[in-house]
Image (spheres, helix red, strand yellow):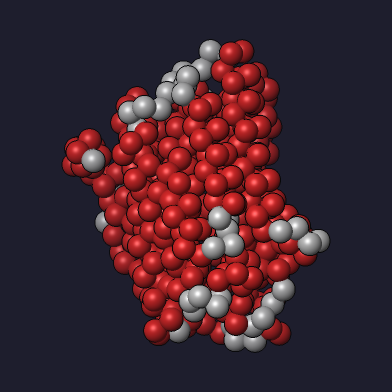
C-alpha cells in the first residue's frame, strides 16, 4: 500500500482523479442496489433483470467506436465534466420510477447514465498513459482497480443497509449528491494535454485505428484477452440468486449488498498478494485460478453463507487479472492511439459483459440451474488462459 500512497503524493492530478473515482464509484453502488431492489419488488421475470444488467454495459459497446476518436480530438477535462453532469441528471431521473409501466423510462435512464459512466472511464483510462509510464502506469491501473473494489465493497455493503432503512429514492438522491462532490473537485483539477488529431475527421480516425490494429495484431489479441474478464459480470446472476435462493434468509437489499460486498472484499485484498507475483508468465495461472474459484462458488451457490465465503475467492483474482491485462494493452500500443484503442478495448470488454448478463437471463428462463450458469462462466476463463498462452508464445509482448 505504501507504493500507492507514494504514487498519489507524487502525482497531484492522479490524486484528484482517484478521489473523484472513490466518491463517484461509492455512490454508484447505492443506485445499483436500489435498482435491483426495485425490480425484485416489482416482481419482474428473470429476463427483465438480465436485460437491465445488460443495459449497464450495452451503451458503452454502442458508443465506443466514436468515443475514442472524440477523446483524441477534445480536451479530456471537458469530456469528464460533461459526463459527470449527465450522470447527476439521469440519477435524479430514477426517482420517478415506481411501477412496471414506467420500466421503459428506467431502461432509457440506465442506458444514458451508463453511457456517460463508460465515456468518463474511457477518457480517464486514455489519460493515464499520457501522464504516467512504466511501473507508475501499472501501479495506477492497480490503484484504479483497488479504488473500484474498495468502493464496491463498502458501497454495496452500506447501500444494502441504506436501501433497507431509508428506501430506494433516498439511495438515488445520495448517489446524485456524491456525483456533485466529484464534479466540484474535477472543476479545480488542472488537466492540460496537447490534442494532436484536430485536423482529422472522426471517420478518418476510426479507419486509421482499424489499420493500426491490423498492422499491430498483437494489440488486438491483448484486447480480446482482456475482454475475458467481462465474464465476471455477475449482477444478473446475483440478483437471480437472491430472488430464487436467498430472499427467505435476508431482505432483498441486504442480500444483494452482502453478496456483492463479500466478492468485492476479495477484489480489494487480491492485488496486495498478487501484485508483485503477477507477470507475463504467471498470467495463464491467474486465468486458471479464476476458473477454479468460479467452480467453487457455483458448487456452494444454493447456500447463502457458503456462497458469501466462496465469493471472496472469486473476487481475489479478478482485480489483478483486469489491471494486468489492461496494462499489457497500454504498454504495447502507440501513444497516438491511446483514446481510440482504450475505447475499442472497452467496447470488447463491455460487449462480453453485456452478453454474459443477457445470456444469464436467457439460460435461467430456459431452465438452466444457476449453478450450471456459474460453472459455464468458469469454463470461459480456462479458454481465456489457453488463448493467452498461445499469444504469449507467438508474439513479443512488453510487460
Give left or right: position of 216 versus 189.
Answer: right
Q: Quadrant of residue 176?
A: bottom left
As drawn, 364 above or below 177 = above
Taking depth in this image into account, of 253 and 38 the one nearest to the observer is 253
Residue 159: x and y in percent read 41, 71
Residue 1: x and y in percent read 23, 41
Across the whole image, how many numbered discs are drawn on residues?
A: 0
Residue 305: x and y in percent read 46, 63
Q: Quadrant of residue 165?
A: bottom left
Give left or right: position of 389 versus 305.
Answer: right
The residue positioned 49% from the left and 47% from the top of the image is 314
Residue 118: x and y in percent read 53, 53
In this orientation, does residue 25 appear? Answer: no
As drawn, 150 above or below 203 = below
Give left or right: position of 110 versus 27.
Answer: right
The residue positioned 62% from the left and 60% from the top of the image is 237
The residue positioned 64% from the left and 83% from the top of the image is 42
In this orientation, does residue 236 appear? Answer: yes
Amino acid at each position: 500500500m505504501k507504493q500507492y500512497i507514494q504514487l498519489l503524493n507524487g502525482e497531484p492530478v492522479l490524486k484528484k482523479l482517484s478521489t473523484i473515482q472513490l466518491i463517484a464509484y461509492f455512490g454508484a453502488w447505492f443506485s445499483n442496489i436500489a435498482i435491483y431492489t426495485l425490480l425484485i419488488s416489482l416482481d419482474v421475470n428473470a429476463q427483465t433483470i438480465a436485460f437491465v444488467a445488460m443495459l449497464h454495459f450495452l451503451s458503452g459497446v454502442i458508443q465506443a467506436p466514436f468515443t475514442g476518436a472524440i477523446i483524441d480530438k477534445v480536451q479530456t477535462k471537458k469530456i469528464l465534466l460533461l459526463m459527470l453532469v449527465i450522470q447527476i441528471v439521469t440519477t435524479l431521473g430514477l426517482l420517478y420510477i415506481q411501477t412496471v409501466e414506467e420500466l421503459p423510462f428506467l431502461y432509457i435512464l440506465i442506458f444514458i447514465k451508463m453511457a456517460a459512466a463508460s465515456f468518463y472511464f474511457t477518457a480517464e483510462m486514455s489519460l493515464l498513459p499520457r501522464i504516467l509510464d512504466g511501473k507508475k502506469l501499472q501501479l495506477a491501473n492497480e490503484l484504479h482497480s483497488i479504488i473500484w473494489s474498495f468502493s464496491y465493497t463498502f458501497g454495496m455493503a452500506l447501500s444494502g443497509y441504506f436501501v433497507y432503512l431509508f428506501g430506494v429514492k433516498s439511495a438515488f438522491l445520495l448517489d446524485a449528491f456524491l456525483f456533485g462532490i466529484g464534479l466540484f473537485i474535477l472543476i479545480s483539477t488542472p488537466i492540460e494535454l496537447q490534442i494532436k488529431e484536430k485536423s482529422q475527421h472522426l471517420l478518418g480516425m476510426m479507419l486509421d485505428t482499424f489499420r493500426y490494429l491490423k498492422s499491430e495484431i498483437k494489440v488486438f489479441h491483448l484486447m480480446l484477452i482482456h475482454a475475458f474478464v467481462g465474464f465476471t459480470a455477475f449482477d444478473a446472476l446475483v440478483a437471480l440468486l437472491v430472488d430464487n435462493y436467498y430472499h427467505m434468509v435476508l431482505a432483498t437489499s441486504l442480500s444483494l449488498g452482502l453478496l456483492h460486498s463479500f466478492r468485492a472484499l476479495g477484489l480489494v485484498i487480491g492485488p496486495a498478494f498478487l501484485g508483485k507475483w503477477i507477470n507475463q508468465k504467471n498470467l495463464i495461472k491467474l486465468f486458471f485460478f479464476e476458473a477454479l474459484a468460479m467452480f467453487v462458488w457455483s458448487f456452494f451457490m444454493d447456500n447463502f453463507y457458503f456462497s458469501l465465503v466462496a465469493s471472496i475467492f472469486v473476487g481475489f483474482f479478478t482485480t489483478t487479472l483486469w489491471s494486468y491485462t489492461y496494462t499489457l494493452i497500454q504498454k504495447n500500443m502507440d501513444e497516438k492511439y491511446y483514446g481510440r484503442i482504450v475505447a475499442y478495448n472497452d467496447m470488447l470488454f463491455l460487449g462480453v459483459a453485456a452478453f454474459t448478463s443477457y445470456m444469464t437471463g436467457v439460460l435461467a428462463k430456459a431452465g438452466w440451474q444457476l449453478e450450471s450458469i456459474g460453472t459455464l462462466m468458469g469454463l470461459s476463463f480456462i479458454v481465456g488462459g489457453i488463448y493467452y498462452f498461445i499469444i504469449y508464445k507467438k508474439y513479443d509482448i512488453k510487460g
